[in-house]
C-alpha cells in the first residue's frame, strides 16, 4: 500500500482492518504463531489510527445544536444591546424646600 493511499482512507477503514485482524487472532486460538501474526497487524493498525487520527480535545463550551437556538441567542443579545434606558430628568431642589 502506498503512502498516498493512506491519506485518502478514513478512520473507519483502519478500524475495520484492526477488528478484522483481532477476529482472525481469536479464531486462530490453537495456532500460536498465526495468532501472533494477526495480533501484530491489529497492533499496527491501532498505532496507525492513533497517529493519523489523534483524539480531539473536548470543548467544554456549549454550542447550540440547531440554527433556531443560535438565532434566538443572537436576537436576545441584540435586544439587550439596543435597549434604551429612560431616565427621568432630575429636578433641582430649592434650598427653601429642604428640611433641616
Image: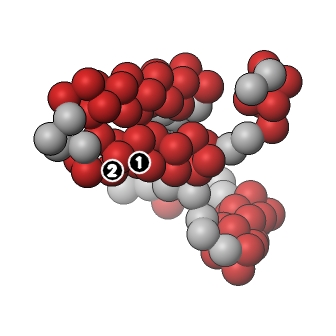
Label 1, secondary structure: give it. Answer: helix
Mark 1 vs 2: CB contact within 8 A: yes
Q: Which residue ends up furthest to the left in the rendered image?
A: 30
Q: Residue at x 36, y 55 (%)?
A: 99
- Residue 89 falls left or right of residue 51: right
Q: Residue at x 70, y 62 (%)?
A: 77
Q: Is residue 50 visible?
A: no
The circle drawn on residue 19 is: 1
- Residue 2 falls left or right of residue 16: right
- Vertical arrangement, residue 10 with respect to residue 49, above or below: below
Label 2, secondary structure: give it. Answer: helix
From the image, which quarter does the N terminus lie in?
A: top right
Image coords of residue 59 (percent x, y):
49, 41
Q: Residues within 10 Å of mark 2 (few under 14, many from 20)?
A: some
- Vertical arrangement, residue 94 with respect to residue 86, above or below: above
- Residue 45 falls left or right of residue 73: left
The circle drawn on residue 23 is: 2
Camera-side residue: 5 or 12? Answer: 5
How far apart are labels 1 and 2 at the CA level?
Answer: 6 Å
Image coords of residue 49 (percent x, y):
53, 31
Camera-side residue: 24 or 61? Answer: 24
In this view, the mark in front (1 or 2): 2
Q: Which residue ends up furthest to the bottom in the rendered image?
A: 68
Amino acid at each position: 500500500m502506498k503512502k498516498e493511499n493512506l491519506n485518502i482512507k478514513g478512520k473507519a477503514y483502519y478500524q475495520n482492518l484492526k477488528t478484522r485482524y483481532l477476529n482472525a487472532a481469536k479464531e486462530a486460538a490453537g495456532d500460536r504463531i498465526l495468532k501472533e501474526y494477526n495480533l501484530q497487524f491489529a497492533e499496527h493498525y491501532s498505532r496507525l489510527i492513533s497517529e493519523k487520527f489523534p483524539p480531539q480535545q473536548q470543548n467544554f463550551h456549549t454550542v447550540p445544536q440547531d440554527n433556531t437556538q443560535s438565532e434566538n441567542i443572537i436576537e436576545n443579545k441584540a435586544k439587550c444591546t439596543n435597549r434604551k434606558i429612560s431616565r427621568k430628568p432630575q429636578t433641582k431642589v430649592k434650598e427653601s424646600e429642604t428640611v433641616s
